[in-house]
Amino acid sequence: MKTKQVIYDNYFDLHSLNKYSSVMALGNGYLGVRAAHEENYTGQTRGMYVAGVYNKASANDTSDLVNLPDISGMLIEIDGKIFSMLEGDVLSYQRALRLETGELRREFIWKDKTGARFQFVFQRFVAKNQLHLLASKVTVTSLDQPARIKIITGIDAQQTNFGKQHLIEESVRVFNEEILQGVYQTTETGITIAIAASIHAPEGSRISFSAKNRQLNAAIVQDIEKEEPFVFEKIGTVYTSLEIANPESAGLADLEANSLLGYEALLEKSTSAWQEFWLQKGIEIQSTDAFDQTAMDFALYHMEIMTPAHDERFSVGAKGLTGEGYKGHVFWDTEIFITPFHLFTEPETAKKLLRYRYLHLQKAKEKAAQNGYEGALFPWESALSGKEETPEFAAINIRTGTRQKVASALSEHHIVADIAFAVVQYFQNTLDEEFMKNEGLALLKETAQFWISRAVEEGDKLSIKDVIGPDEYTEHIDNNAYTNYMAYYNVEQALYFINQFHDADEQFVSRGKDFLNCLYLPKPNENKIIPQDDTFLSKPEIDLTPYKQTQGSQAILLDYSRAEVNEMQILKQADTVMLLYLLPDLFPKEVVAKNLYYYEEHTIHDSSLSKAIHAIVAARCDDEEAAYRFFKEACLIDLGPNPHSSDEGIHAASLGAIWLTAMFGFANMSQVAERLTFNPKLPKNWSELTFPLTYQGRKLTVKMTHEHFEITKLSGPDLDIEINGREYRLSDRVEDEIKK
Ligand code: BGC
C-alpha cells in the first residue's frame, strides 16, 4: 500500500476558514467534527454532529442535523493576552489532515507584539475504532522567555444551527476535578445527548472550573520556562439516547476506560483502524499528476466518515457530518452516488443504507396516499422520521421580498426509481436472496406501484406529467426522459424479481405489464437527441459561457428568475446524461455521444452531482480528453481554490462520484445481468490503476495498465467474468492483453 495522501492548508486565511473546516473535518460515521480552529474567529462555524440527531426548532420548520455543544474550542492566553493569529505575526504555518491516520495537526510559530516567539502544535482526531471517542492535544513552547499559559476550554452549548437553538441544557457537572459532563435534550425529538471531556492538565498547573451561560469550562494555568513545552490533552466522549438507554453513564465509563491511555496511545489504535481501511478499500493510481491520488484518497476518507455504517436507522446527509448545508438531509445522493462504493467494498453497509429506506417504507406509502398515489413515494429529503423534510420555500428573494416555493417535494419523484435501482444493484452484487425476498421485493413492488398509479393515459400511451428530473432548473415538465426510463426500469425489475421469487400477485403483474407496454419512452429525434422532456428541445437557447465559468454558484439566478430559466434550454446538472450513465445499454454508442455533447453544452454544472457523471459517459464514449478533464474538474469541487463552495460542508455525492468515475468510467466496470465485466478506458495520464472489489461473495483485486488487465481472486468460488468482450472463468487470476 502506498502512503496515503495528506490534505494541506498552508496559509491562515480568514476567507477559507469555513471551507477548510469542512474539507478537513474528522469523523467516523457516528460523529463528525468540523475542523474549526481551537481559538475563535468571527465567522468561523464550529460544528459537531451525530448521525441521526435531528430536531425541528419550530413547528413550521423542517428538521436540522443538530449542531451539538462544542468541545474543540479553546481560549488561550499568553501572559494575560488572548492569543489570536490575527495579532502579532505567524512566522510559519501548516495544517495537515493525514488521511492515513485520520489526525488533524496544526503547527506554527507565532510572534507576539513584543517580539516573543511561541511554537504551537494542535492535534486532534475522532477515533475510528471507537465510535464515541475523540481527543485533542495542545503543545505550546515559549521559544524566547518564560511565560504564563492559560487555556480555558470545556463544553460549550452556545452552539446553534445558524442561530437556531435545538437543545435544552439538562445538567452540567464536574467529576473528580477532572471530568466535565454536559447533558442536553433536543426540544422536539427528545433525544438525550451526553458529552463528557476529561482534562489532562500538565504537572504543576492550577485548574479551576466554572459553569455559566450554557458553557461548562475548565481553566488551566501554568508558568513555563523558555523551551519547556506546555502539554495539554482533552479526551471526549459523546453518547445519545438513540443508541443507549443511559448515555450519561456510558460516556463516563468510556472516559474512565480510555482517557488514562492518553492521546498518543489512543491515536495509535485509531490509526490501525484507518490503516486497515486503506488496506481493504484503498485505490492506487499511477498518474502524471499526484493530485489524482490525493482526490481519490480524499473521496474515500470522506465516504468512510460520512456513512453511519453502525446503524441502519440513519443514512448519509448531502454534506455528510461536516456541516449544516441542506440541514443534514438525505437525498438520492445516497443511493446513486455513495452506496455503490460501499456495495463494491463492504456490501453489508450498502444493505444498511437500503434498510434505512425500508424502515421508512410506511412513511413513503403515507406520502404517496396523501398525494393521491398508490405505492411508496419516498421523500425528496429525508431525516430521522422518514417524513418529507424538503423546506416548503427557498431562501427569500431580497429584491421582491417573496419566497420561491420549492417544488422538489411535490414533483422530484425520480428518487423513487433511484432507490429501486440501488436495490437491484445490491442484488446483482450480492445475490442476497434473503434481502431480496423481504426488503428488496417490498421496496421494488411499492415503488413500482407508485409509478403505475403516477402515469396518466394520453391517447394510447401513458405519460408521467408534471415532474422535475435531476435537472432542477427545469420544473413542472412532462415525460422527463430520465424519469420515464427509470420508472420503466423500476416496474420491469419489480416484475422480473416477482417472477424470480414466485411472489406473483396477478393484478399487480397485469397492471405492471400494461404500464410497460404503454409508457411513453422518448426516442432520439432526427438529430439523435433524446428530448429531455416534451418541451425542452423547443425552448430558446442562450450562451452559457459566463455561467459555466462561475459554475457551482448558481449565478444565472442573479440574471434570470427561476421561471425564466425554466423556459430556456438550461440544465443545472446531468439529466439525460445521468440516464445514459445509469442505463448505458439503452441506446447505441453514437446516440450516447451525441447526447453527451448536446446536453453538456446546455449544462452549467451548478450542482456538484454533474461533472463526474459527464466524465464517466465521456470515458465510455472514448473521449479520453473530455473524460479526464471532467474528472479533474469534479475533483476540484471540494479541493479546488474556490474558498466558499464547501463552507456548509463537503459535497458528499460529488466525492462518491470520484470513485464512480474510476470504477464505472475508467475501469468501465459493469454488473448488468449479474455478470462482472470490464472494458477499461484508462486516461492517458494514468499508467496504472489498482483497486479491490467485493463481488458476489468474492474478494477480488483488479490491476490495469494501458496494455494489460489483471484480476485476482483472493477468496470465494470461481466466477465467470468478461474483459474487453472476452469471457473468462476466474479461478485464481485472469490476465488479458488490451489491444489498441
Ligand atoms: C441537486 C440535487 C441534489 C441536492 C443535494 C441539489 O443542488 O440539484 O440533485 O440531490 O443538491 O446534494
Image (tube, rainbow, N blue to C red):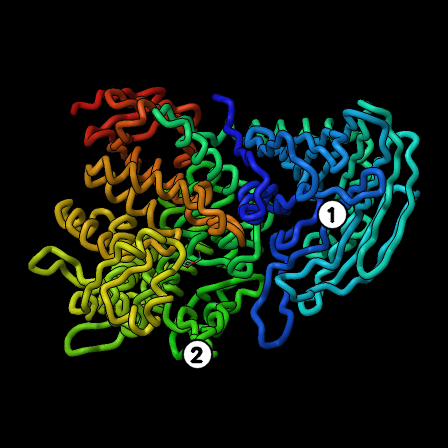
Residue 311 placement, left or right of 529: right
**Vertical order, 12 against 506 (above or below):** above
Which numbered tag is attached to residue 683? none
Q: Quadrant for residue 328, please give it.
A: bottom right
| Disc 2 secondary structure class | loop
Q: Is residue 132 visible?
A: yes
**Vertical order, 52 against 1 (above or below):** below
Residue at figure coordinates x 59%, y 50% from the top left: 311
Residue at figure coordinates x 25%, y 44% from the top left: 617
**Vertical order, 495 against 653 (above or below):** below
Residue 698 placement, left or right of 301: left
Beta carbon of the mark 2 residue lies under 8 A of ligand 1: no
Total of numbered circles in the picture?
2
Mark 1 or mark 2, which has the lower sequence index? 1
Q: Are marks 1 and 2 in contact (CB under 8 Å)?
A: no
Ligand 1 occupies quarter: bottom left
Between 78 and 513, the residue placed more toward the observer is 78
Beta carbon of the mark 1 residue lies under 8 A of ligand 1: no
Between 39 and 129, the residue placed more toward the observer is 39
Q: Is residue 499 visible?
A: no
Residue 264 location in percent, x, y? 73, 27
Q: Residue furthest front?
A: 114
What amino acid is labelled 1 in the image?
Answer: Ile
Residue at figure coordinates x 52%, y 68% from the top left: 387
Between 324 and 21, the residue placed more toward the observer is 21
Mark 1 nearby-residue class (10 Å; few <14, some 14–19, many ≥20): many
Residue at label 2? 400
Mark 2 nearby-residue class (10 Å; few <14, some 14–19, many ≥20): few
Which numbered tag is attached to residue 71? 1
Of badges 1 and 2, nearer the viewer stands 2
